[in-house]
Amino acid sequence: MTLNAADPAFEAALRADLSPDVFRPVEPRYLEEPRGLYTGQSAVLALPRDVQEVASLIRHANAARVGVIPYGGGTGLVGGQVAEHGPAPLILSLERMNKVRAVYPDENVLVAEAGVILSDVQDAAENANRLFPLSLAAQGSARIGGNLATNAGGTGVLRYGNARDLCLGLEAVLPDGQIWHGLTRLRKNNTGYDLRHLLIGAEGTLGVITAAALKLFARPAKSGTALLVVQSPAAALKLLSMARDQLGEMVSAFEIVNKMGFDFLSETMPEVRQPFDTPPVWCVLIELGLSGDLDPATSLETLFESAMEADLVTDGLIAQSQQQSDDFWAIREMIPHANRKVGSISSHDISVPLGAIPEFITKAGEKIAALGDFRINCFGHVGDGNLHYNIFPVTGRSRQDHLNEREQIKMTIHDLTHELGGSVSAEHGIGRLKVKDLERYSDPAKLSAIHAIKAALDPNGIMNPGTIVPAPI
Amino acid sequence: MTLNAADPAFEAALRADLSPDVFRPVEPRYLEEPRGLYTGQSAVLALPRDVQEVASLIRHANAARVGVIPYGGGTGLVGGQVAEHGPAPLILSLERMNKVRAVYPDENVLVAEAGVILSDVQDAAENANRLFPLSLAAQGSARIGGNLATNAGGTGVLRYGNARDLCLGLEAVLPDGQIWHGLTRLRKNNTGYDLRHLLIGAEGTLGVITAAALKLFARPAKSGTALLVVQSPAAALKLLSMARDQLGEMVSAFEIVNKMGFDFLSETMPEVRQPFDTPPVWCVLIELGLSGDLDPATSLETLFESAMEADLVTDGLIAQSQQQSDDFWAIREMIPHANRKVGSISSHDISVPLGAIPEFITKAGEKIAALGDFRINCFGHVGDGNLHYNIFPVTGRSRQDHLNEREQIKMTIHDLTHELGGSVSAEHGIGRLKVKDLERYSDPAKLSAIHAIKAALDPNGIMNPGTIVPAPI
């Protein structure tokens, strides 16, 4: 059964029940997304201030069978925040639910409303001498509710896990408008199905997260950063094992950068000072966060020496100051910007088992070469098996020249990923962009369970229609 | 609609489809559980050797509407493994699916079938110079499938998380007999609802876990153990914060022991040599697992000195050898045995927010004292907010003298736990024992979601009937 539009009658019904202050005209920013792949049409915009207002809005939408788009920071990369097609929806922005409700330093817990910007969560933790380790490019505008709804990844996953691993409890409104008061601060709680983990990663299709109890951590006493030139991706993985044998969980990040990343930086941002005179084919950015009087420089030197002995690395730079460490990270963080300037034909957020990374990189390179002349920038969270594997035109050509090849390139990469036991969406989610990929690559039993759960919890299909599962038609 | 019995006709249908070797007569051990609270009646017993046989059994059971009891090591403490009432079920024991399928040391992954005994998983990890950190009293007989189905806890949760946090992927058979091939070794995989986390902790009510990809960790280079006498439970929590500020994640375990534990040991096992001449009112067992050349004795001495300065501890013993460390742990592990010898009137597996522990201990003591003369042994995983809070008769009386008071004692403890934002089942699960507790204390929205999910994935209600949700009637 199809959904109804959020028409003037629907809006009038909402307004009869809620304060006029909840509603605002829809600005264009609610109808756009960062990659420009989706543009929303008309919609009713509501900006509730508390969970009761959220529940009231959802109850109305469910009764009227109007689609609801939960809206966080709008930074998602798979179109989960914009409905291009279908009847006009209710956009439900969490931006006014932006309070850190409480911080419990001795419990290592922080309770935040869904609309708190990720960097504000980080800051609130730091003010209590604690760490909230979720860290990603969009942290200055992404909101924690969206981070949880999409199970965000980023550079802290290696040590601290994905967004889902950082959440102890949730407050949420289910598709029928019931409020789930699940904001527990418990480390152990085995009382029935884990609704928290079901809502996390459901991308707003099973309800709206309105607040979360988040895990905090002790801040490492000292940190250290190095850029190590590795012989190969396989050597990078051996280096990671070696680092963990020496330092356990104190390895905080392990990112890989390919020569193409340095080349793109030279090409698009020549003003950026590069760390190596000659860009290495492969290097890793390693970050340590140490406790117990351990010294970062010594620890990194020890690691470097054993890696040299084992023939894993050939060269390396150990940051000698916080500035230099920041500079190394800036290089890593500027690569996506450089990519955008060059203009990718197709970008892929894939993961494979760690051991399959070398094979993936070799085979993907061969398969893309067989399709034509392209440049490949492969970089990312190699310690998590998560690569951003992006295909670009050669110098002198543009992405527009290759629009026809895009689908084939994507399928080539995704098929290979799948063949190697990998995931075609490592950290960005399914959104509206990858619904067909999910159907193509998902295990059939899992897919049928997804559909059964969606139908059970959201029988009218109002929650973020078209995301993860196709919209009701 | 009620279930049908696993009668001779049903067994004949199974036998027509499966090898005779799959079936064995039901020995008493499949119909008993450790606390003796439940005794099963007749049943058909199947011991499948692979996932195909599991799927075939489930398909038959679903078609015939016969209840299925997935059976692991039989060590659960809430009756999830024994159906006392209702039509005779099919007991599906995973004990023959006991292969470690593969170990990937550089990936920190181990793939095990559901029937592998937990200590065998630990051993296989150790043989690859890795750590599988799930650790609990029953590890010599509990099987990993059951550990996952019940989201087992134990002493390693503080550092490494609950069982669910140690699982990357699952192979499982859903209630309709479909096999979910979800045995990925991925660290990041955002492709639709997290079926893994839904099955983990579902206690066999949404399907049968047949294999799991498990996370391994680097083995800490050195470990150290201390028994520190703390001023109070509040001081214990401050000590934990202090330990983490100094050592981050390298604090591996943090258990609390009350004087009553030492007294029970003297009473029931006088041959055990006790660490303190005079048992302290409260002490904590702290275990460090260190990397990067850190020295355990030095680290523990530093911690002890700062804790003395802060007036948190008054005395302490730092293990000077592995033997002494083992002895400290043996004390902690013998307390449940001593409890069993004394004979509790009512035992409780509760958790509260860390900050609420002092209040819980004070108020629970007062409330129990108001009910009569009892002895309380409160001990456990205080670093996780998880206490085993058990009530015993005074010397000279027995549990039989208090059977009438049992329900009131339990409700008193559970009501207080709930009032403080806690959980009445921290690590043992709901099983059949706590179905009414779940109904009493669960958030209504969560409870209705649980019922909706159960109905959606197991419409005939065949999977572990009577566990978590009431059996079909």
Image (cartoon, coloured by chain):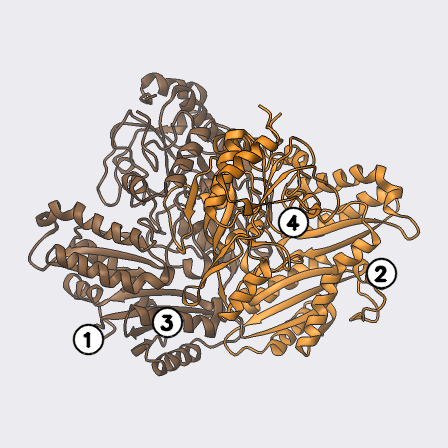
Chain colours: A brown, B orange
Quarter of the image where one finds residue A45: top left
Disc number lying in front (3 or 1): 3
Q: Is circle 4 on the same chain as circle 2? A: yes
Q: Residues within 10 Å of mark 4 (few under 14, many from 20)?
A: many
Q: Which amino acid, mark 1? A: Thr
Residue sitting at 39 percent across and 19 percent down? A64
Disc number lying in front (3 or 4): 4
Q: Which amino acid, mark 4? A: Gly
Q: Residues within 10 Å of mark 2 (few under 14, many from 20)?
A: some
Q: Is circle 4 on the same chain as circle 1? A: no
Which residue is most to the right?
Answer: B396
- Mark 3 lies on residue: A238
Q: Which amino acid, mark 3? A: Lys
The reply to whether the C-beta atoms of the residues labelled 3 and 1 are less than 8 Å apart is no
Whichever of labels 3 and 1 marks the residue nearer the N terminus, that label is 3
Chain letter for mark 1, please: A
The reply to whether the C-beta atoms of the residues labelled 2 and 1 are less than 8 Å apart is no
Q: Position of residue A177 (x, y in %)?
A: 48, 27
- Mark 1 lies on residue: A278
Q: Check disc 4 and report its element: helix, strand or loop.
A: loop
Which mark is on residue A288?
none
Quarter of the image where one finds residue B436: top right
- Mark 2 lies on residue: B268
Chain letter for mark 4, please: B
